[in-house]
Amino acid sequence: MTDPSNPYKVRSSSDSGYRITNAVYEHYKKLHEEHGESLETKLGPYDKKPYQEFLKIYNEEKKKEEKEKSKKKQPSPKAIAPKANYRYSFSGSDCNVFARVRSTSTMIHLDSVSTVSVSIYEAKAPVRRLGYASPVGFTGNIRTVAGSIICVLRDNHPLSEMMQGNFHKKHLDDNQIRDNGKGNFNSGALYPFDLMLMYKNEVGDALGFSIYNVEIISEGIVTSTNDMITEVVLQFQATHIDQIEKKS
């Protein structure tokens, strides 16, 4: 922006490139504000060309000022839509999975987990009454909580950190399965543990729930030339699951 306090600084039109000093610009500006559009009819032949170029520069600068004012008037994003009005869901990338070893209450971040699925099955049966086509009610039920955990295979078994001192010896030949107490072992020999899933998205909303007494019942791995990554699939059953709730 040209310094208006310096009378020898020049202003130029972006259209014609015509240049006038600040002193000339301020002179024509004062006359223009006093007489308006009728000024051109009052000017002599030598003043008309400079005055026309002044108008071009004057109008350009007016447009710039209006743009700057409109930018300042625009409300901030918070004023347009406060955070309370946003409702976003959560992607898998928004979720962190933790395992709590029940024997030591140690929390372990399972950062290789890519998928967790869980379902609750309620074994309800309809109660029938003679002469009625529809059931009149449903029996009490037993409940099964089960699901699967899919992990990306990297530098070690996905549950290797949980396998340190968390071996559940149930059989006489368990030491052979565990390689005589060294290294990793079948994940089915782990003590029951809890899974905690914590969600937090880009607007700061947070949810979470826990799955209790997780018992691994099967483990599998698939390696294929058609896959870009290798995954370890663990299937489990559990005794209880929390309802999803908002976290602060």
Image (spheres, rainbow, N blue to C red):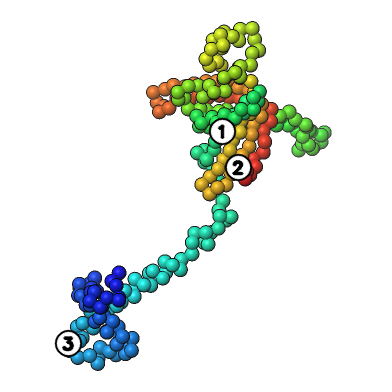
**SS for dot 1:** strand
Residue 97 - label: 1
Tell me the tag on residue 45. Answer: none
Residue 136 locus on image (x, y percent) = 79, 37
Q: Tell me where residue 52 appears, x and y as whole percent.
A: 23, 82
Location of residue 2 (image quadrant): bottom left
The residue under the point 20% across, 87% down is 47
The image quadrant where one finds the N terminus is bottom left
Q: Which residue sits at x=55%, y=47%? A: 204
Q: Residue 150 or 136: which is nearer the viewer? A: 150
Give how far apart the Cα atoms at labels 2 and 1 are.
12 Å
Residue 207's mark? 2
**Image check: 89 left or right of 136?**
left
Q: Would you name the residue on which mark 3 appears?
A: 46
Q: Residue at x 50, y 29 (%)?
A: 112
Q: Is residue 119 left or right of residue 96?
A: right
Q: Secondary structure at mark 2?
A: strand
Outermost residue on the left side: it is 46
Residue at position x 75%, y 33% in the image: 126
Q: Amino acid at mark 2?
A: Leu
Classify mark 3: residues with Cα within 10 Å, few (<14), some (14-19) or many (20+): few
| The C terminus, quarter of image | top right
> Which amino acid type is shown beneath numbered disc 1?
Val
Q: Position of residue 68 (x, y in %)?
A: 38, 69
Of residues 15 and 240, which is closer to you in this image?
A: 15
